[in-house]
Image (cartoon, rainbow, N blue to C red):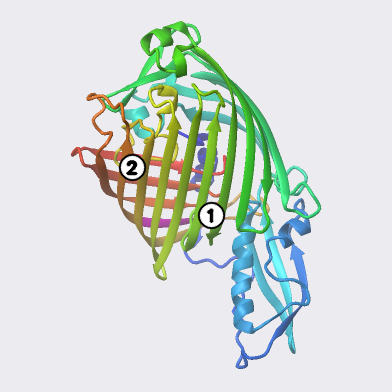
């Protein structure tokens, strides 16, 4: 299961802890609601003090604050800005907790405190990860075989210089052999708007998904390696504010498959070859207008990306992707999450290398996770109605600064998903292509520190099959 080692770390803390309060108050002061009988006047920001940041630079935090020294606001405006500042500081993924509040009001002057609890930034951790697309596939189709597991060591540093720059190094064995390195610095210049990232990866494996049959992946496994791949990537990023992000990435890639794979599927790669070297270009725009990016409860976000692989006429693939999330609050503890994912591909639509579409990565229908639908165009809508159940705060008996209390939030949900995948050359043995697809079900989501979201789901699909789903999403 993805991120299993980190999950075990968190769950072990729960096992050795006890509940000290269901609605326990934080050590921080609560976020201020500025009450005044005169909302027509203005409050001037007299000072902004930051406490608790040992590594993170003050200006990285202040970059997320929507007010500055000397600015004037009406009391109700400042109340809203205090909440917005906290949300944007938390969305940096640098802190376990943050509070922004007025510590003192002196006539028409407001003095602001920002209290933060920094996360752990350095993680040399053991790695245990399923190679299958999801937990369902590993259990139902491969009987939880440990042969389909990657294991090794991962090293993360999530705040190398205190500027929210990240470094990762992966040394992985097991099902596949991997070596990966990546460094990202989103705020590399004085304006804190321009950044870059650089990375490379090498992978080789003895088993490969070379085709689809009955909307299931078909694999070939040999004693020797059936695939070698190399990736290199250089990215420029531009973040004019806390909500918009723009990226341009240039990559150089090499993929090679064995003659065994080529015989099984001559059209795995374009133009009947077993080796391709190709450049890539990605342009992406993101907007995050939500309260909390990993698990939004209100707001709107979208992502538009254009991707081009290879500039050779025979091998070229152009892909346009649009992803949106619209979260509508319905009551104090309930909200509706509408998530869509649309993809259009232009290029060689016979090549299996180009056809992966539905059932991969984030493009899936809950209840149909065990299936894949290949194609060149598709759309998915994931609709979820949430109701918050309760919150537990666990007191850690091991006195670790910043991690004294571990909050867990539990949400019940009902979901209904819809989708369609277009494949001009879909064979009769892959019947889910070119059909309207739908599923429904229920589940529970659990959120906790480090942006972890545990999703437990039970769904029913249009084939009459039921499916139990378990997914973990987190920083690692």
Q: Is residue 130 visible?
A: yes
Residue 63: x and y in percent read 72, 60
Distance from Cα at disc 2 to Cα at disc 1: 21 Å
Q: Residue furthest left?
A: 464
Question: In the rendered structure, which segment of residues is drawn in magenta?
Answer: 406-412
Vertical comparison of 311 with 474: above or below: above
Residue 140: x and y in percent read 30, 28
Q: Name the foreground residue: 366 vs 312.
A: 312
Q: Quadrant of the N terminus?
A: top left
> Horizontal placement of 60 versus 227: left or right?
right
The residue at which mark 2 appears reads as: 365
> Horizontal placement of 101 versus 294: left or right?
right
Q: Secondary structure at mark 2?
A: loop
Which of the labelled discs sits on residue 293, or is there none?
A: 1
Residue 111 falls in which quadrant of the image?
A: bottom right
Vertical comparison of 447 with 360: above or below: below
Give the residue at x 77% y 68%.
Answer: 49
Q: Secondary structure at mark 1?
A: loop
């Amino acid at each position: 299961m993805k991120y299993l080692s980190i999950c075990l770390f968190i769950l072990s803390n729960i096992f050795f802890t006890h509940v000290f309060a269901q609605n326990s108050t934080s050590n921080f002061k609560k976020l201020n609601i500025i009450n005044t009988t005169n909302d027509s006047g203005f409050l001037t920001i007299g000072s902004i003090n930051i406490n608790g940041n040992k590594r993170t630079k003050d200006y990285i935090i202040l970059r997320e604050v929507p007010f500055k020294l000397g600015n004037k606001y009406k009391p109700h405006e400042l109340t809203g800005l205090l909440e917005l500042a906290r949300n944007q500081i938390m969305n940096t993924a640098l802190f376990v907790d943050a509070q922004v509040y007025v510590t003192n009001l002196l006539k028409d002057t407001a003095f602001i405190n920002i209290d933060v609890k920094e996360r752990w930034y350095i993680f040399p951790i053991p790695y245990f990860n399923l190679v299958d697309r999801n937990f369902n596939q590993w259990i139902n189709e491969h009987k939880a075989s440990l042969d389909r597991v990657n294991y090794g060591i991962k090293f993360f540093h999530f705040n190398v210089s205190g500027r929210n720059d990240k470094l990762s190094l992966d040394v992985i064995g097991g099902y596949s052999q991997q070596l990966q390195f990546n460094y990202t610095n989103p705020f590399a210049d004085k304006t804190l708007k321009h950044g870059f990232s650089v990375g490379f990866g090498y992978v080789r494996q003895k088993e490969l998904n070379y085709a689809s049959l009955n909307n299931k992946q078909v694999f070939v496994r040999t004693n020797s390696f059936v695939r070698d791949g190399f990736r290199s990537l250089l990215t420029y990023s531009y973040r004019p504010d806390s909500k918009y992000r723009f990226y341009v990435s240039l990559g150089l890639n090499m993929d090679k498959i064995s003659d065994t794979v080529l015989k099984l599927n001559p059209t795995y790669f374009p133009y009947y070859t077993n080796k391709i070297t190709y450049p890539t270009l990605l342009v992406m725009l993101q907007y995050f207008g939500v309260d909390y990016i990993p698990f939004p409860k209100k707001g709107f976000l979208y992502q538009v990306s254009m991707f081009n692989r290879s500039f050779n006429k025979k091998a070229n693939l152009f892909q346009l992707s649009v992803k949106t999330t619209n979260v509508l609050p319905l009551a104090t503890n309930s909200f509706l999450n509408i998530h869509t994912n649309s993809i259009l591909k232009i290029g060689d639509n016979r090549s299996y290398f180009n056809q992966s579409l539905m059932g991969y990565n984030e493009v899936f229908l809950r209840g149909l996770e065990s299936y894949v639908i290949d194609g060149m165009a598709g759309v998915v809508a994931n609709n979820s109605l949430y109701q918050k159940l309760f919150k537990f705060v666990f007191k850690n008996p091991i006195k670790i600064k910043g991690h004294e209390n571990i909050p867990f939030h539990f949400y019940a949900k009902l979901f209904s998903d819809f989708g369609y995948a277009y494949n001009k050359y879909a064979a009769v043995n892959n019947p889910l292509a070119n059909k309207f697809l739908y599923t429904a079900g229920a589940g529970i989501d659990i959120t906790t520190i480090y942006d972890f979201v545990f999703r437990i789901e039970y769904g029913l699909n249009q084939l009459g099959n039921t499916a139990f789903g378990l997914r973990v999403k987190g920083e690692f």
